[in-house]
Amino acid sequence: MKQQASDEFPLWMKLLSAGTAACIADLATFPLDTAKVRMQIAGESRPLLLATADGSMLAVRNTQPGLLRTVGNIIRVEGARSLYGGLSAGLQRQMCFASIRLGLYDGVKSRYAGIIDGNNRSGSKSISVRIAAGITTGAMAVLLAQPTDVVKVRLQAGSIGRSVRYSSTLQAYRNIAAEEGTRGLWKGTMPNISRNAIVNVAEIVCYDIIKEFILERNYLRDGIPCHITAAVAAGLCTTLAASPVDVVKTRYMNSAPGEYKGVKDCAVRMMMKEGPSAFYKGFTPSFTRLVSWNIVLWITYEQFKVYAKKMNGDQ
């Protein structure tokens, strides 16, 4: 009966609820996302040059500050508003991105259940079905929302390592298109598809499975405590799985034209110059942000669903 009610939930309302919930989550956690981007691109710029007593120059490698220090440095040097640089593009991204990857998930999962498991009633519970649905909706969402992601990353990165700065989101779209062509707005699409396929599977599928596990064993009722528990677990799984490709995606999107030959070149140079730990730069803000983001997202989305079902007479 619950599954039927979910299927009757209007698609347009699912898309709107998912996008709105993601925007609320972004508003609550955007400073952490900005700090994560800054920490991920740290190491791209040249080392500091210091003059010694005999007049020679000494190259000193920049040390990576932690989360709190990164946030403090941004506020001290650029002002608190810089923590929300790219917020407009971020909200545009969520309305395009989350509405598809989350709003279409249940429908795609039901379709795949029929294809993979036929008329098997347990089809929608199959892990392979959920993974396939997560990969599909994640890839679809990236293809639509990629330009907003590129602009968001550029605005969050600021002028680190280069003189490029954008005064507004609209100017960023225009400048990137004019200087780098239309392809510039879809720069890093492949690593972003990889990243968001992993994120979708780790985030939505983990939340789906853990929430179902809790409810089936009657550990908690279907309410906010259950949603928070599942969201925290999903945030941890997502951070562990997605951090390496997320760092590569951020570096590549933020790079100047010709700086890297491609995504593989970016990853190889990171490994050669900075070691394996470079792939987990920004892990703390990424974990903090993803857990917080998931809590806000899922609580908001679940409440939207309850409200919408009441409006449609499902409860």
Image (cartoon, helix red, strand yellow):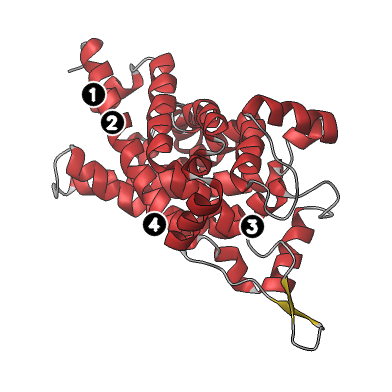
Q: In the depicted view, which residue is nearer to us: 30 or 63?
A: 63
Q: Name the residue rendered at 63%, 29% in the picture.
A: 169
Q: Residue 236 carries which label?
A: 4
What is the distance, in whole Å, between disc 3 and disc 1 at their CAs?
A: 40 Å
Q: Residue 162: x percent and y percent? A: 75, 51
Vertical side of 201 occupied by 169: above or below: above
Tell me the kind of residue under disc 2. Glu
**Residue type, numbered disc 3:** Ile
Counting residues from the N terminus, which is met first, the one under dot 3 or under dot 1? 3
Q: What residue type is labelled 4?
A: Leu
- Residue 231, how many percent across, how many down? 32, 46
Compute the Cα span from label 3 to label 4: 22 Å
Does the CB distance between marks 3 and 4 fall below 8 Å? no
Residue 44: where, in percent of width, then height?
71, 61
Q: What element carries label 1?
A: helix
Element under label 2?
A: helix
Viewer can see residue 311: yes
* Marks 2 and 3 close (CB-CB < 8 Å): no
Looking at the image, residue 278 sits to the left or right of residue 190; the answer is: left
Q: Name the residue under label 2.
A: 302
Q: Residue 306 carries which label?
A: 1
Taking the image as shown, residue 176 lies to the left or right of residue 98, namely right
Badge 4: how crowded within 10 Å, few (<14), some, or many (20+)? Answer: some
SS label for mark 3: helix
In this view, the mark in front (3 or 4): 3
Q: Name the residue under label 3.
A: 41
- Residue contact at pointers 2 and 4, CB within 8 angstroms: no
